[in-house]
Image: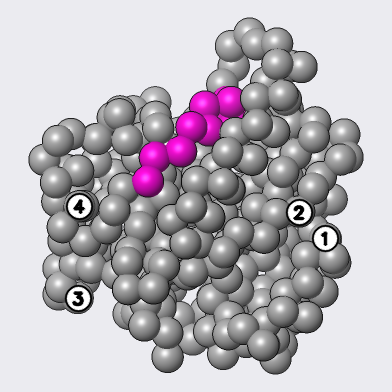
Amino acid sequence: MSLFPQAPNAVVMIRPHHFSPNEQTAGDNSFQSSGEFDPAEVSRLAYEQVTKAAETLRSHGINVHIFEDESTDTPDSVFPNNWFSTHLGGQIAIYPMYAPNRRKERRSDVIEFLKAHYRVQDVIDYSGLEYDNLFLEGTGAMVLDHIERVAYAARSNRTDSHVLERFCSHFNFEPMVFDAQDKQGKAVYHTNVLMCIGSDFVIAGFEMMTDTKRRDEIIRRFEFAGKKVIHLTEAQIGAFCGNALELHAGSKRLLALSSTAFAALSQSQKALLEQSVTLVPLDVSAIELAGGSVRCMLAGIHLSKR
């Protein structure tokens, strides 16, 4: 059993050479920017920001595996956590993706690398469910509590409850589905922009959960598990405060989050988090134009090394 089952020590990152916000995902991603920008400049900045983020994480003791994406038809490839996840016990899951061009992000070389360097017993591939218009976009669609074995998932185009149940049956999680909307009544497209679960804390936009009974049940579960519950406002969710990932280096735990999110957290919220983790802000402002942030960029490796 890992010392910190919630917090991996290694991550996969994809460095894009032709990054841009994805037109195919703009319809249901209200976090995606609709403003004017210089595509060439945004692409250059995204490349530099991924490079710098990886260097910063490595300086804190995180093992970062970077893969290059030189293609021009995978604008969201910088978000690998949506198409695969890894699990203690040597399992990998591969997921069905909602946008057709995102399906091209799946890479056999990444899976083969993991098999060569980590102990992989089984790869379960759900991607064929795309033909039935059933989708579950990995640890974007789900936020997993690896300690309590609960998969939290907000209903959306990217999260089908039947696929979630299938995943939970295979990987020994309890599904916890809920609805979450912004003030305009639009469903939150990915659960991981709403919620971050750490080893002993949770930060989430609970006010955006529309069913008060379900919301109260979820909060009680976290409190019963002994986690500090930190409430985020909708404005803070819009600044990607919920899109963070706990990591560990030796006995030290970190929280990787964006500079945007760090600036939006209150001093009292930072103080609460710093009781548990060292906050590591990363500038990913160009990438945030696509509607995702640091958590989306990090595919955590919950596998044992060979």
Tell me the amino acid under the disc marked 2. Answer: Phe
Of residues 159 and 62, the one nearer the viewer is 62
Q: Which residues are magenta?
A: 280-291
Q: Is 249 above or below relative to 282?
A: below
Of residues 44 and 162, the one nearer the viewer is 44
Q: Position of residue 39 (x, y in %)?
A: 74, 16
Q: CA distance from mark 4 to mark 3?
A: 19 Å
Which of the marked residues, 3 or 2, is nearer the chain's N terminus?
Answer: 2
Query: What residue is disc 3 on?
Result: 225
Q: Residue at x 72, y 25 (%)?
A: 43
Q: Nearer the viewer, mark 4 or mark 3?
A: 4
Q: Which mark is residue 107?
A: 1
Q: Is 88 above or below relative to 44?
A: below
Which of the marked residues, 1 or 3, is nearer the chain's N terminus?
Answer: 1
Q: Residues within 10 Å of mark 4 (few under 14, many from 20)?
A: some
Q: CA distance from mark 1 to mark 3?
A: 37 Å
Indicate yes or no whether the magenta region holds residue 166. Answer: no
* Label 1 close to label 2 by CB (< 8 Å): yes
Which of the marked residues, 4 or 1, is nearer the chain's N terminus?
Answer: 1
Query: What residue is disc 4 on?
Result: 274
Q: Nearer the viewer, mark 1 or mark 2?
A: 2
Q: CA distance from mark 1 to mark 2?
A: 10 Å
Q: CA distance from mark 4 to mark 1?
A: 36 Å
Q: Position of residue 21 (x, y in %)?
A: 68, 28
Q: CA distance from mark 3 to mark 2?
A: 37 Å
Q: Nearer the viewer, mark 4 or mark 1?
A: 4
Q: How many marks?
A: 4
Query: What residue is disc 2 on?
Result: 67
Compared across the picture, whether 208 is left or right of 41 comes to left
Q: Residue at x 28, y 30 (%)?
A: 264
Tell me the amino acid under the disc marked 3. Answer: Ala
Q: Which type of secondary structure does the marked residue at label 2 adopt?
A: strand
